[in-house]
Image (cartoon, coloured by chain):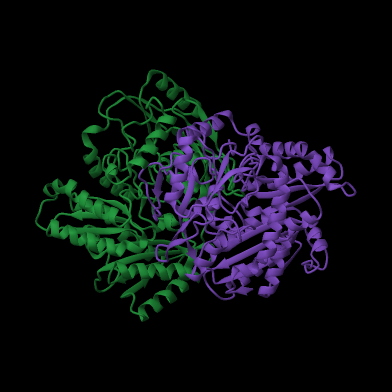
Chain colours: A green, B purple
Amino acid sequence: MTEGIDKSNVLLDEERRLASHQEVKASIDDDVNARIKRESARVEPKESAEVAEVVRACAESRTVVVPQGGNTGLCGAATPDASGTQIVLNLSRMNRVHAIDTRNNTMTVEAGCVLANLQNTAEEAGRLFPLSLAAEGSCEIGGNLSTNAGGTAVLRYGNARELVLGLEVVLPSGEIWDGLRGLRKDNTGYDLKQLFIGAEGTLGVITAAVLKLFPLPKSHATAVVALQDSEKALALLDRALEACGERLTGFELFSDFCLSLVLKHFRETAAPFPRRFPHYVLMELSDTQSGEGVRALVESMLEAALEEKNILDAAVAQSDTQARAFWKLREFISEAQAHEGQNIKHDVSIPISSIADFISATDQDLIRAHAGVRMVTFGHLGDGNLHYNVSAPEGVAPDAFVKNTAAINRLVHDSVARFGGSISAEHGLGQLKREEIRRYKSSLELELMRKIKRTLDPHGIMNPGKVL
Amino acid sequence: MTEGIDKSNVLLDEERRLASHQEVKASIDDDVNARIKRESARVEPKESAEVAEVVRACAESRTVVVPQGGNTGLCGAATPDASGTQIVLNLSRMNRVHAIDTRNNTMTVEAGCVLANLQNTAEEAGRLFPLSLAAEGSCEIGGNLSTNAGGTAVLRYGNARELVLGLEVVLPSGEIWDGLRGLRKDNTGYDLKQLFIGAEGTLGVITAAVLKLFPLPKSHATAVVALQDSEKALALLDRALEACGERLTGFELFSDFCLSLVLKHFRETAAPFPRRFPHYVLMELSDTQSGEGVRALVESMLEAALEEKNILDAAVAQSDTQARAFWKLREFISEAQAHEGQNIKHDVSIPISSIADFISATDQDLIRAHAGVRMVTFGHLGDGNLHYNVSAPEGVAPDAFVKNTAAINRLVHDSVARFGGSISAEHGLGQLKREEIRRYKSSLELELMRKIKRTLDPHGIMNPGKVL
């Protein structure tokens, strides 16, 4: 039971998280490689009016603008192409919090605010801003909104899209659209902000936002649960939602192979049980009520599941330190696989009811096509989001193995499509999946997207070559 | 404490709710009056393919299509103009539930499904579909999504927009866009469904949707709280959110004048306290845990608030019957004011922190301009949404008083704008507020809306004369 704890303590130590994130990003940047990082100029405005001025000038001269925040994205959406003719518009200097309204439960912030700073600002005001992801120490809120970021709290609080009440956007014409409204209900026409959220900077530059705040949880409970297979993990998710409702704030799956990588590369970590099991779930409950309630709740739920043999073992953290140790087993996976050498990464989502079948079918197809491959299967099971990564067979050099990237992507993404899933759950398309998506999205949908792009950005100056 | 109850029992008896809704609607239809209800033809398709065929034919012949569901909207968005040349496309026969997936917590439904039927379908499967509003016995989900409906559960579960994962839409070209995805994370380009939600049928016809389901609450607690003023109600909202978090599923304000109308017109109702107070809040808590927890929680919170003199009195329902009686005091307000004669209605939202100031300033302005007017102030305070209605002074005939509608709308809406609010919180624009919104929305925003309309509906056949 971890009562009254600062959530940042429970999570991975920030520097380590960021290091891990940078390693993952570096390996992905290799994929996007030659195409990126040649900018003709770099502009770092401090006001929306300056952003507008720059964009207006670019519109007139038909110069391409690449909006950029913390540049921590994994798909190359915030980096210029190799032409050397594109201007990078970096918003990091626009990092002021304009207002925090604890009674309206909102804060009004500029696009360049670093996510972790916003979490802290909210907490100092006695509120929670729940968006939380590996890059939070350096990613910026404008980028989070432009990519509709996900992370570990989506199960309870939704994606970045659901955390926004209002936006200010500099349009490709250089005009400023002021949609900075702090209203929970507003049905006065098309909800324009939705267009810019998740558009990866291709429709305009988000310069400010009104964000939702939530009551600060006062108690937490963290548990690691051992399971036979992912089907049992889904049954546990059902049970947890039914018993705990919105107290369930985290539900993360990882396989024993993931655990073995973490234990191998991080000596300070320890296996949660005396013996090993095929799969594990990390569960977190949170409550605005202080006290022992959530720990008692998770314990009684896990006892019942054990009696019914739906789970194989369970450990409920008895201290902050233990909760932190449990989270490390999940959070260190990305870094552990990076230490192991490159692998072939996928960020996919599947209807939750089909996840077990998806894993089983795709595992089989992969093993048939590439004997000996090892799956690094983990992710935000509560959201249907898997990081389904494929490692080289034992004895095969990772660098040689990644030559199979195209074939393995094809196999995995085709399987995702068969199960009604998405080939980019939370990372976006950027440059990395811009071609790939054409195989999976209907031509009608692609054409609708192109029409909207042309309507808002008729000269194509706003981050071309990304998404579409 | 109302444990394990069917929520529909707590709410107003369905027939009465609908009667009340129809009376409110009739009085609003008077406003829209001569313009509506002359259709050249009425089409009632049973399949999306038939909808597509009709729209394609209309696109070719440049015939206007007016999509219609239960036609319970309050702003005339689903009714044709007076020309007699417009075709009504009614979706009521498309009323099948295609799938319910309790593990993915989704249901896939056709647009013509009546909202109350969907609530029941979800409940039979052990899940909650939380959208709840006065017209639920006859409104249809396609209309709910097209108008981004609000209602009594927004505080906890969000507007209709937030309850949708996927849509199927027949575009103004007659093409069918299949966006029926059941994914909680999908970042593969522009989120097109957002365009059609809340567009009031002006961008296409929603024919089916994948809706989110939630764990079914197993306990409820309902209380009526007496307060000095709306400022104290806001302080209570703060306290309730901090203590109860997501257990808080209802937070409704009404003034003593509202109560007096209900007590006058409904003999079966009773005042909640031996004496009268200036304002009341109806609170509802819900929990996925059964037992006495939520009642104990609301009691201890209200005791503390009483001790601190933040509230004047409080009554916690001791039975289902009493909870139902409390809800009637809030739910009968619309019908009670209809019995009293016409008044001038507003559906506005304000940043929650400014609501007390808004009420006080607007009350003063109105009384100064129209001596003796009586405010019927009630609404979903937890969402910042007020139904701020203005009744004739005592002794003035309501029919004569409503001649002041334009002047009073102007005064109220100008005040809303000064406080950063919206002149249509949950009802939409339709025909009723289409002109009015031009005063309050920037020309840039209106032009963006028009551009999107022209892009998706170049021939202007899809519900013209609504919204824009």
**Up-down relation of residue B398 to residue B132 (above or below):** above
Marker count (numbered): 0
Residue at the far bottom in the pictured view = A307
Residue at the far left in the pictured view = A395
Residue at the far right in the pictured view = B395
Visible residue check, residue B304: no
| Quadrant of the image containing the C terminus of chain A | top left
Q: Residue at x 65, y 48 (%)?
A: B74
Which residue is at the front of the view, B366 or A458? A458
Residue A30 falls in which quadrant of the image? top left
| Quadrant of the image containing the N terminus of chain A | bottom left
Which residue is at the front of the view, A87 or A113? A87
Q: Position of residue A267 (x, y in %)?
A: 24, 60
Q: Position of residue A449 (x, y in %)?
A: 39, 38
Image-based side of B91 in relation to B400, left or right: left
Residue at the far top in the pictured view = A61
Residue B328 falls in which quadrant of the image? bottom right
**Up-down relation of residue B449 to residue B67 (above or below):** above
Q: Position of residue A165 (x, y in %)?
A: 53, 44
Image-based side of A424 in relation to B75, left or right: left
Image-based side of A249 in relation to B335, left or right: left
Residue A362 falls in which quadrant of the image? bottom left
Q: Position of residue B174 (x, y in %)?
A: 43, 42
Q: Residue at x 31, y 33 (%)?
A: A465
Q: Residue at x 62, y 57 (%)?
A: B133
Which residue is at the front of the view, A122 or B166? B166
Visible residue check, residue A364: yes
